[in-house]
DNA sequence: CCATTATGTCAGCTATATTGACATATTCCG
DNA sequence: CGGAATATGTCAATATAGCTGACATAATGG
């Protein structure tokens, strides 16, 4: 019902509309703006279905993901990455802990810290969710051929705020220490 | 304070962890999963700041964007694209109308329809928000050189559910009818 | 010992979404 | 014509995910 296709006027608009203060002179990249919207929507859609059955949402997914990727991380690290308040994180984290997907251990050096780890169940879930997203990504990269992986990576990395791009890229590369890197590396 | 960099154990994990039912055999694309998260976060971050000052949120942005891109669209079309309920849309749409960014016109053929259009103020705002996102995209594409645009487009398009990818791509291409296409087209 | 740090928690608020029920106007079809 | 279907809007209750502000506890560190 109600197909997306829209069959309406689409008045031809002034081509060189002055766009006001902060905007650019160039014609908007409508295609990219919409592609990013739809691509991200479907990218997070697969995990959403699994999470819903467990009574979890996207917030739980993000926490589980980063804890799985960075075992032993501190609560403060997580707050920094997710850019949410500790009150928001608190509720989500508590639910993950209560249901046995995340565990906390006292810091060895600093006993104030509650270092975060996934439980075996947590790792299984995190890997399942990552598997769904990996399947989607892998399918696309396979369709597009050799150079596609690096091209897409560079585009996505470039979209990150220049200010903390290096920090983020370091974070992304970071957790691979000591892990086998199955594919074409880099 | 609390740099993102995490300096912890990172226990080497079993390489060939069996991942359970729906998951893939391949090692997860951790880099892509995280790049998409951070890239999308920053991509929507710029508009967020502008919207906040107007008392709007991301939901308003999405509605304004698609109405601007598809003047004369029906409410049902919008529900289909955004995949939300009419109750959710109702509130957001009402606020955009009340504040004068969106207008409704009775359908010429079918008087049940309330066709949606942006007002001049609405177009200005939509263009401003698109300009922010375009600046980010344009900067990246400029840095990456010639082939980058098409490569990124193909990757993003591939990430959309195969099921309705054609519908979405048609929608994206659709609103360009009658518009000048400033750049390298296609 | 005191300031700072790391974390947790209570209380209340906002934004965005949901489901279910129902109302109104209009169009379509037999 | 008259009833079914369609397009839209609205009321009420609920859920999720975020927020601010205030405060508590425990541990660290000078």
Image (cartoon, coloured by chain):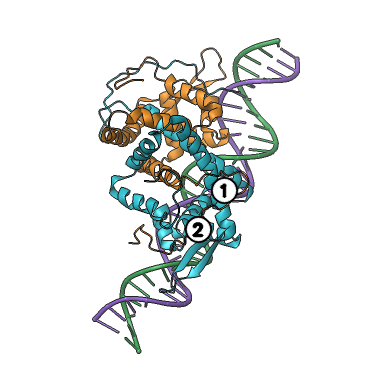
Chain colours: A orange, B cyan, C purple, D green
Q: Is residue C27 above or below residue B135?
A: below
Q: Secondary structure at mark 2?
A: loop
Chain identity of mark 1 = B
Q: Using the image as rendered, state which of residue A121 and residue A38 is in the foreground.
A: A38
Image location (x, y in percent) of residue B25: 25, 28
Q: Can residue A41 be seen from the camera position used here?
A: yes
Chain identity of mark 2 = A
Image location (x, y in percent) of residue B33: 39, 32
Q: Using the image as rendered, state which of residue B111 and residue A19 is in the foreground.
A: A19
Image location (x, y in percent) of residue A9: 43, 64
Q: Residues within 10 Å of mark 1 (few under 14, many from 20)?
A: many
The residue at which mark 1 appears reads as: B128
Q: Secondary structure at mark 1?
A: helix
Is disc 1 on the same chain as disc 2? no
Residue A151: image quadrant is top left
Which residue is rendered at x = 57% and y = 32% of the image? A86
The residue at which mark 2 appears reads as: A13
Q: Using the image as rendered, state which of residue D24 and residue C3 is in the foreground.
A: C3
Q: Can residue A100 be seen from the camera position used here?
A: no
Which residue is rendered at x = 34% and y = 29% of the image? A149
Residue B49 relative to residue C22: left or right:
right
Q: Residues within 10 Å of mark 2 (few under 14, many from 20)?
A: few
Distance from disc 2 to disc 1, alpha carbons, whole Å, reads 15 Å
Front: mark 2 or 1? 2
Q: Are marks 2 and 1 in contact (CB under 8 Å)?
A: no
Which mark, residue A21? none
Image location (x, y in percent) of residue A174: 44, 19
């Amino acid at each position: 019902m109600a197909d997306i296709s829209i069959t309406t006027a689409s008045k031809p608009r002034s081509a060189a509309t002055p766009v006001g203060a902060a905007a650019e002179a160039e014609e908007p990249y409508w295609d990219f703006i919409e592609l990013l919207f739809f691509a991200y929507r479907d990218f997070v859609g697969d995990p959403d279905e699994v999470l819903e059955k467990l009574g979890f949402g996207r917030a739980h997914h993000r926490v589980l993901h980063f804890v799985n990727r960075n075992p032993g991380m501190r609560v403060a690290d997580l707050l920094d990455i997710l850019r949410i308040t500790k009150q928001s994180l608190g509720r989500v984290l508590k639910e993950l802990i209560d249901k046995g997907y995340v565990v906390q251990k006292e810091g060895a050096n600093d006993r104030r810290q509650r270092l975060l780890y996934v439980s075996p169940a947590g790792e299984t879930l995190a890997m399942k969710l990552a598997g769904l997203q990996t399947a989607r990504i892998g399918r696309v990269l396979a369709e597009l051929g050799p150079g596609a992986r690096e091209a897409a990576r560079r585009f996505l990395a470039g979209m990150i705020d220049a200010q903390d791009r290096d920090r983020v890229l370091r974070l992304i590369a970071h957790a691979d220490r000591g892990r086998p890197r199955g594919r074409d590396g880099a």
